[in-house]
Amino acid sequence: MKTKKELKDEYKQMEFHMGVFQIKCTVNEKCLIDNGVDMESKWNRHKMELKFGNHRNKDLQKDWNQYGEDKFVFEVLSELKKSDEENLNYNKELKTLQDLIIEELKIKNAY
């Protein structure tokens, strides 16, 4: 059995995919654009909130309830690679990237 320290060290070595993604309703083409340092975990959090009916975005929750989970897709829009720079604020970088993508896509139908 591994020690707590060994498990912690293994976790630190794991590579998470960070970037900007969208949750899109295939019925009305509305989308929510978000970012995360671990996109898979962030998507799972959104999905669990939606399944339990307590997502913070009430319009998205309403459409999820109306159309069902199978009418929504998760799509990665841009991925951010890990940098060798020591004090890089990935959350700030991701927010900037998200803002650029929203501006570039000119999304009119957003949650």
Image (cartoon, grey):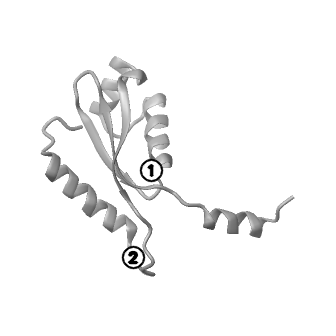
Of 95 and 79, nearer the camera is 79
Quarter occupied by the N terminus:
bottom right
Quick one: which residue is furthest to the bottom in this view? Answer: 86
Picture coordinates of residue 28 (x, y %)? Answer: 22, 24
Image quadrant of residue 50?
Answer: top left
Q: Which residue, given by chain and number where applicable, does mark 1 sit on?
A: 39
In which quadrant will I find the C terminus?
top left
User: Residue at (31%, 25%) from the top-left corner?
Assistant: 62
Callout 1: helix, strand or loop?
Answer: helix
- State the mark number for residue 74: none
Query: For the residue carrying disc 2, how many other residues have a C-alpha within 10 Å: few (<14), some (14-19), or many (20+)?
Result: few
Q: Are marks 2 and 1 in contact (CB under 8 Å)?
A: no
> Which residue is depicted at the point 25% across and 63% down?
96
Q: Where does label 2 land, which residue?
A: 88
- How many C-alpha atoms fall within 10 Å of the one at disc 1: few (<14), some, or many (≥20)? some
Residue that appears at 29% across and 25% down: 26
Is residue 9 positioned above or below 61 on the image? below
Amino acid type of the residue tagged 2 in the rendering: Leu
Q: Is residue 32 left or right of residue 108?
A: right
Q: How many labels does the image show?
A: 2
Residue farthest along the right direction in this orientation = 1
State the CA–CA distance, disc 2 to disc 1. Answer: 18 Å
Percent across and percent down for residue 92 are 32, 67
Of the residues shown, which amino acid type is indicated by label 1? Met
Q: Nearer the viewer, residue 23 or 66?
A: 23
Q: In this view, does 78 lie above or below 61?
A: below
Q: Is mark 2 on a helix, strand or loop?
A: loop
In primary-sequence order, the first of circles 2 and 1 is 1
- Position of residue 66 measured from the top left corner of the image (x, y, whole percent): 33, 18
